[in-house]
Every structure is written in structure tokens, then in C-alpha cells.
Amino acid sequence: MDERVELGLALLERLEYESLPLPEVVDRIETITNDPIVARTILDEAELRGLIEREEGIVRVKSRQYVRFEEQVVTKEGDFSCRRCGSSLSTGYFLKLEAGELGPFGSSCIRKVTGRE
């Protein structure tokens, strides 16, 4: 399977919300890919695996595996652009998941992507 799909599934599995509107879930998926076919595959596969349920534009997260910031978020210094908002960063936050590393993000975007904000 495409590594972007596996990374998307790992991210959805760790969202800290019971439910989110579909556009907010797509916002998180777009940190991995802007390809609508891959995004749809991520959503379809997440539903097939029982990670989420979709109904009337709402996505319900079934997993309760949250991001452990102390272990799964790594900080790196350098010249980065936030993967979510495009802002310039001197400190990047990277999310380490079983399927790979996702980032860099700024301090507020890493919280948004993981569901802490």
C-alpha cells in the first residue's frame, strides 16, 4: 500500500477528537497529500479498518490511541516551512508514527494536527 495511505491511517488513528467535520479531517490529511484520490483512499481504508465512521459530513474517531508528545513529537532546529500553514520555521515539530515521520509543523499547527487544540 502507498506509504502516504499508511501515514494517513496512522495519523487518523491518533486524533484526539471523538468527532470532527469532514473538512477538518481533510485538513489533517492534506499535511500528507494534496492528491484527492489518495485522500479518499485514506478515508475509505480508515473506515474499512474500523478506525473511523463517517455520517452526514461528520467523522467519528473510533481509536483512542493518542499522540504521546514526550515520545512521538521530535523537535529539530533548522530552516523549515510548516507542512500545514506554510509559515517559515526555525524550529520544526515532527510527528513520529509507525508508518513514518510527518512534519515539519509549527508549535500551534502540531497541536492542531494532533487534536490538542
Image: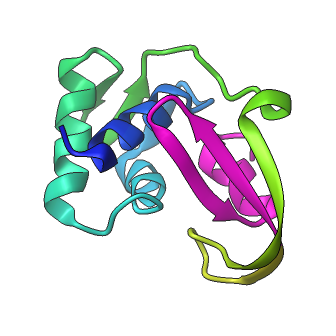
Q: Quadrant of residue 17?
A: top right
Residue 37: % across, % down: 13, 58
Q: Is residue 29 left or right of residue 56?
A: right
Q: Is residue 49 left or right of residue 15?
A: left
| Residue 32 against residue 2 in the figure, above or below | below
Residue at 38% in and 42% down: 8
Report the magenta residues as a range: 91-117
Q: Quadrant of residue 67?
A: top right
| Residue 116 against residue 88 in the figure, above or below | above
The quadrant of the picture occupied by the N terminus is top left
Residue at 65% in and 23% down: 66
Residue 11: % across, % down: 49, 37
Residue 3: % across, % down: 30, 45
Q: Is residue 52 left or right of residue 35?
A: right
Query: In this rendering, does residue 56 appear at all?
Result: no
Q: Quadrant of residue 59?
A: top left
